[in-house]
Image: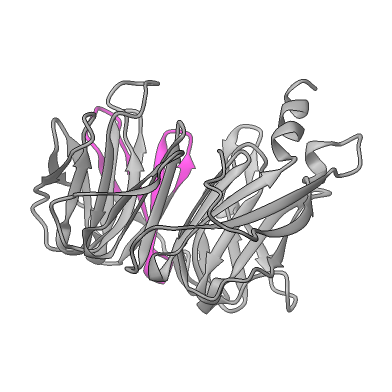
């Protein structure tokens, strides 16, 4: 994505492509370029989404921002002052243009951005905080405090999906080719299926046990001694029971109380983890093992959201902070890799 040219001195950090992308070659040099972008707000920004060159950020007091490549970040009227915690692109037609965005937040708030660019408030029937969103094809789910799970059906109608769990639910991950696991506090796992069109969810045994007692936050296991991340195999996502653990050796995994959000770059295989005090970690595969390295960046705000696809990414956090991450050299490397 083009730079907004607002940062007079973008921070640059040398890195390298994951070795596994070039089995026959040495890793190629790339440069991570972090550029601050003006949001024209000082409220905390909690989440960011990116797809088909559309980028949106949401945050406290009902703030929603859209990135315009020429005009920068533009504020949009949402009709709510409730804090917003998650946003997702939810196209109404399979494999079609993203013509709908959905955001959720405090006290059961749900709003939808329609194709004409206007936001509409939707009734969810709950006062529980909605902390996360999932969308795939025609299925949109919201989940949050106290085990609440809601399905968006029809033209903005939400209906409850019993989870039989009281855990705060934060994140999701495939736990079977046709099933979804919603993850939360205390190692909670709620497995959801849609066999005949109706979504049904059942708690699985908690992953917290032995030396892994912790909360799931954004497909990361938050714990002082271990980090767990999805491990992708040739036939898709592995079951949770065989997720790979990253044991801390003093520096290989982020401290538990610093992690806030994570994102996996589906093109490069890299992961970005962001958190408190401007913390940023990069995770990549090298010689069949996943490594985690701390990126020392000149930011001191708490980051709450991250998205990272191809050669672009965005970090959002307190004080209305938005950082555009452009990976110079990665796009060409990915293009070369496709031809192999």
**Along the line of sight, the residue nearer the viewer: 310 or 137:** 310
Q: Position of residue 328 (x, y in %)?
A: 71, 44
Q: Residue at x 69, y 66 (%)?
A: 295
Q: Position of residue 266 (x, y in %)?
A: 59, 39
Question: With 307 as the anchor, is 205 left or right in this view?
Answer: left
Q: Quadrant of the C terminus?
A: top right
Magenta stretch, residue numbers = 173-201
Between residue 250 and residue 33, name the one nearer to us: 33
Magenta highlight on residue 159: no
Residue 48 visible in the displayed image: yes
Say if residue 132 shows up in the picture.
no
Name the quadrant of the N terminus.
Answer: top right
The total number of labels drawn is 0
Q: Dividing the picture into quarters, in which one does residue 88 lie? A: top left
Can you say whether 15 is above or below 1 in the image? Answer: below
Q: Nearer the viewer, residue 128 or 308?
A: 308
Q: Is residue 172 left or right of residue 62?
A: right
Please report the residue visible at 22 percent of the width from the left and 64 percent of the height from the top.
61
- Image coords of residue 57 (percent x, y): 37, 52
Q: Position of residue 212 (x, y in %)?
A: 54, 72
Say which residue appears at 71% left-offset and 58% top-offset: 12
């Amino acid at each position: 994505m083009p730079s907004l040219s607002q940062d007079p001195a973008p921070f640059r950090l040398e890195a390298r492509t994951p070795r596994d992308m070039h089995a026959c070659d040495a890793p190629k040099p790339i440069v991570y370029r972090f550029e601050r972008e003006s949001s024209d707000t000082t409220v905390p920004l909690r989440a960011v989404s990116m797809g088909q060159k559309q980028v949106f950020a949401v945050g406290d007091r009902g703030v929603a921002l859209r990135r315009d490549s020429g005009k920068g970040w533009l504020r949009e009227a949402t009709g709510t002052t409730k804090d917003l915690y998650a946003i997702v692109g939810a196209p109404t037609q399979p494999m079609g243009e993203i013509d709908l965005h959905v955001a959720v937040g405090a006290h059961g708030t749900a709003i939808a951005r329609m194709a004409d660019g206007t936001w509409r408030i939707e009734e969810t029937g709950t006062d529980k905080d909605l902390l996360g969103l999932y969308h795939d094809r025609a299925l949109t789910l919201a989940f949050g405090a106290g085990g609440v799970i809601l399905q968006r059906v029809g033209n903005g109608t939400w209906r409850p999906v019993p989870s039989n769990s009281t855990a705060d639910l934060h994140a999701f991950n495939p736990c079977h080719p046709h099933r979804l696991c919603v993850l939360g506090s205390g190692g909670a796992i709620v497995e959801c299926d849609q066999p005949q069109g109706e979504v049904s969810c059942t708690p699985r045994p908690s992953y917290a046990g032995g030396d892994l007692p912790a909360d799931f936050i954004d497909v990361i296991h938050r714990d002082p001694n271990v980090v767990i991340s999805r491990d992708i195999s040739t036939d898709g996502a592995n079951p949770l029971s065989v997720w790979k653990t990253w044991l801390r050796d003093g520096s290989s995994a982020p401290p538990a109380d610093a992690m806030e959000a994570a994102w996996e770059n589906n093109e490069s295989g890299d992961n970005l983890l962001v958190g408190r005090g401007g913390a940023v970690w990069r995770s990549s595969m090298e010689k069949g093992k996943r490594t985690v390295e701390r990126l020392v960046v000149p930011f001191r705000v708490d980051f709450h959201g991250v998205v990272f696809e191809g050669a672009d990414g965005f970090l959002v956090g307190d004080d209305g902070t938005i950082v555009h991450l452009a990976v110079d050299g990665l796009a060409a490397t990915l293009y070369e890799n496709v031809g192999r």
